[in-house]
Image: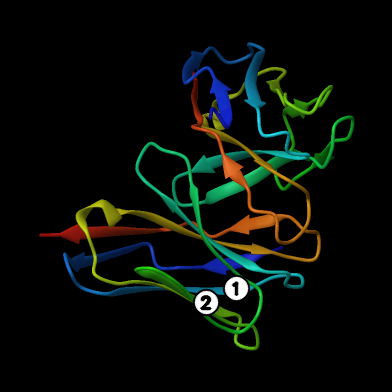
Amino acid sequence: IAGITQAPTSQILAAGRRMTLRCTQDMRHNAMYWYRQDLGLGLRLIHYSNTAGTTGKGEVPDGYSVSRANTDDFPLTLASAVPSQTSVYFCASSDGAGVTDTQYFGPGTRLTVL
Amino acid sequence: GQNIDQPTEMTATEGAIVQINCTYQTSGFNGLFWYQQHAGEAPTFLSYNVLDGLEEKGRFSSFLSRSKGYSYLLLKELQMKDSASYLCAVISNDYKLSFGAGTTVTVRA
């Protein structure tokens, strides 16, 4: 059972470059999420998608974009990376977007922007 | 905004009990999750509380008091493998999870 996969595992990126973080789930979950995790701040929601074809903004969406062309994939794009986007990025999915739906997390992508 | 507070660090001895407190002030309340996260790994689900009271799952229990905006995670019979960060997360009126910064628990022999 793969669950959620993310790629790359880690990346060092020059400021100003474009970068897409990939996320794929094989659980046929409707909802998917992108979080960033920074020391002392906890996980913060960047963008989410309640179902294929729809997306929404989370707590910290600026500088990021997402798309949800199908159920399985939810890529996160940094159009022009900045050093403040250095973080660990986690993708998550849940069966639905309801209050009792547990979110399951991918292994994370460690991104460093220089 | 959402405000979720938990202690930064706790240390305990193998075999002991540790209680991790979480207080929250959020825009509405639709449930509270606890996740475990080992260093360098993804968070994994531990428990979910939506009604007041204690939920027990083996060595781990979670308690909720909605009137006090308070929850705790109780870890009993601590094992070395329980050394991890424990994340408290609340679902507010927008149905999105807001996380606390996490509590790092270190279990010593």
The residue wearing badge 2 is B71
Residue at the extreme right of the image, as rendered: A53
Q: Residues within 10 Å of mark 2 (few under 14, many from 20)?
A: many
Q: For the point 80% across and 41% down, which residue is it? A: A57
Tell me how many marks there are. 2
- How far across and how far down the image is residue B40, in percent? 38, 36
Q: For the point 72% across and 48% down, which residue is it? A: A59
Q: Are marks 1 and 2 in contact (CB under 8 Å)?
A: yes
Residue at the extreme bottom of the image, as rendered: B67
Q: Determine the image quadrant of residue B57.
A: bottom left
**Numbered disc 1: secondary structure:** strand
Kind of residue at disc 2: Ser
Position of B57 relative to B69 (above/below): above
- How far across and how far down the image is residue B35, in percent? 49, 56
Q: Is residue A89 left or right of residue A65?
A: left
Q: Chain of mark 2?
A: B
- How far across and how far down the image is residue B6, in percent? 46, 68
Q: Determine the image quadrant of residue A76.
A: top right
Residue B24: mark in rendering: 1
**Numbered disc 2: secondary structure:** strand
Q: Is residue B102 left or right of residue B67?
A: left
Q: For the point 48% across and 16% down, which residue is it? A: A11
Q: Is residue B103 left or right of residue B4?
A: left
